[in-house]
Image: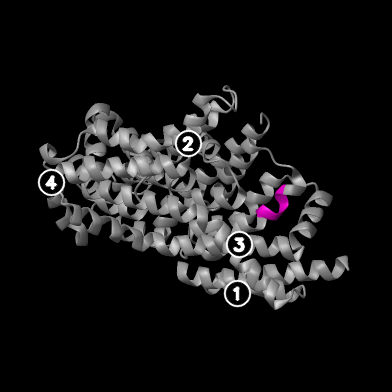
Amino acid sequence: MESTAGLVIVAVLAVVALLFLVMKTKLQAFVALLTVSILVGLAVGMNPGDIITTIEDGMGGTLGYVAVIIGLGAMFGEILRVSGGAERLALTLIDKFGEKNISWALGLTGFIVSIPVFLDVALVILVPMLYSLTQRTKKSLLYFGIPLLAGLAVTHSFIPPTPGPIAVASLLGADLGWVILFGFLAGIPAMILAGPVFGKYISNKIHVGVPEYMLEQVKNVDYDQKNLPSFGSVVAIITLPLVLILINTLSGLVLPDDSTAQSILTFVGHPFVALTIAALLTFYIFGIKRGYSKEQVQEITTKALEPAGIIILVTGAGGVFGEMLIQSGIGDILANAMEQTQMPILVFAFLTATVVRVAQGSATVSMITAAGLVSPLLDTFDVSEPMLGLLVIAIASGATVVSHVNDSGFWLVNRYFGLTEKETLQSWTVMETIIGLVGFGVALILSIFV
């Protein structure tokens, strides 16, 4: 029986690998995860009716939480983008840090901007500023670009409400407060080493200027700062939901469960409520108050849900995958195999995400798939709440390393920075790998204390 079960596991993982190798889009990832889930059920002899029920339970149980958070985050991030919040952050931080420390300002800009705004969108918004700095100083574009990219990539992978960590936290049942806290603790050193430190090194090795086909964009960098939102309002609106969620998590450690204060903090600090408050304030402060009509705000927020929709579907499929592993019994077998090999669950989570990342490219899909494989193990290993947060960071770290030619981010950087494939591997890929390894290293160290 055990040998048969082992063969089933190997077969399932082989099918996963084959499907991911041919995937090119998140839509294909959605289909692949559903297909694998059905094949798992059939392979272990589940009744077709039970397979359908498991799919419904896995999809509904996951999306009931994830869809609301990703949707709200996408909407308030889009309003912030349209209002010029990203540009205001960058201009103010560059002014405060000064010419000498500009790479640190750009790293911090990316770190903050990518919390509400998707990485690729944030890069497109800010890249004309990088071009202008490159032309003015005659430094390599990588000197400015790598710190910004490092900041963007860190929060894109580590800190909610970006879709990846939200999805993984949902699949593992992790408290978002712990994820945010550990995301900052792991993300700051990762951003520093992969951004300003590595950026200075690689810019001395690879000197690239503004690509000729992008020179037109330099003309668009003369921002009218009078029409941009204030720096304080941008920072406040981005950090508000994070602070509320963190206070909710940490208050449980110091306040009695039945106290009025704890009840209030639990309510306003729930991700649903915290993000709803942030979204409504964003609609008013950066939308209505700045001259947008209600119809325009609705149009902007509706458009924001288009890219979020497919991520929500992929997350739901990841929930189906994890639920199928549990109901089929393969999760228990995998847990027993891990106990016999004495592999720590944190290491398994990181390695699993890394393998999927290398195979199919997308960081978000890698996180969701790895979380689906890890979630059935949690009961066996009796994981604490803080450890669940660290598992999210470990999976996010594994899904960040070794970005190469099957990752859309690789080609985005390749085009906007005018790099060859070899130079993109030497810069972007190494930067991503540093982020992942540092993040995982911090998670391992923190796991000693939780």
Q: Upstream in the sequence, badge 3 or badge 1? A: 1
Instruction: Give the residue number, with chain letter if any, for mark 1.
Output: 35
Instruction: Give the residue number, with chain letter if any, for mark 2.
Output: 267
Which is closer to the viewer, label 2 or label 3? 2
The amino acid sitting under disc 3 is Gly
- Say few, some or many: other residues with alpha carbon within 10 Å of mark 2 (under 14 / 14 to 19 / 20 or more): some
Q: Upstream in the sequence, badge 1 or badge 4? A: 1
Instruction: Give the residue number, with chain letter if any, for mark 4.
Output: 291
The amino acid sitting under disc 4 is Gly
State how far apart marks 3 and 4 are (Cα): 43 Å
The image position of residue 418, as x and y in percent, is: 30, 58
Q: Upstream in the sequence, badge 2 or badge 3? A: 3
Q: Upstream in the sequence, badge 2 or badge 4? A: 2
Vertical side of 66 occupied by 289: above or below: above
- Please state the extent of the stretch shown in magenta in the rendering: 374-378
Vertical side of 107 occupied by 56: above or below: below
The amino acid sitting under disc 2 is Phe
- Taken as a whole, is the magenta stretch helix, strand or loop? helix
Badge 2 element: helix
State how far apart marks 1 and 4 are (Cα): 48 Å
Residue 67 falls within the magenta-colored stretch: no
Badge 4 element: loop
The image position of residue 23, as x and y in percent, is: 51, 72
* Residue beneath the point at 70% across and 41% down: 383
State how far apart marks 3 and 1 are (Cα): 14 Å
* Residue beneath the point at 29% across and 47% down: 141
Q: Tags 2 and 3 in contact by the CB under 8 Å rule? A: no
Which is closer to the viewer, label 2 or label 4? 2
Which is closer to the viewer, label 1 or label 4? 4
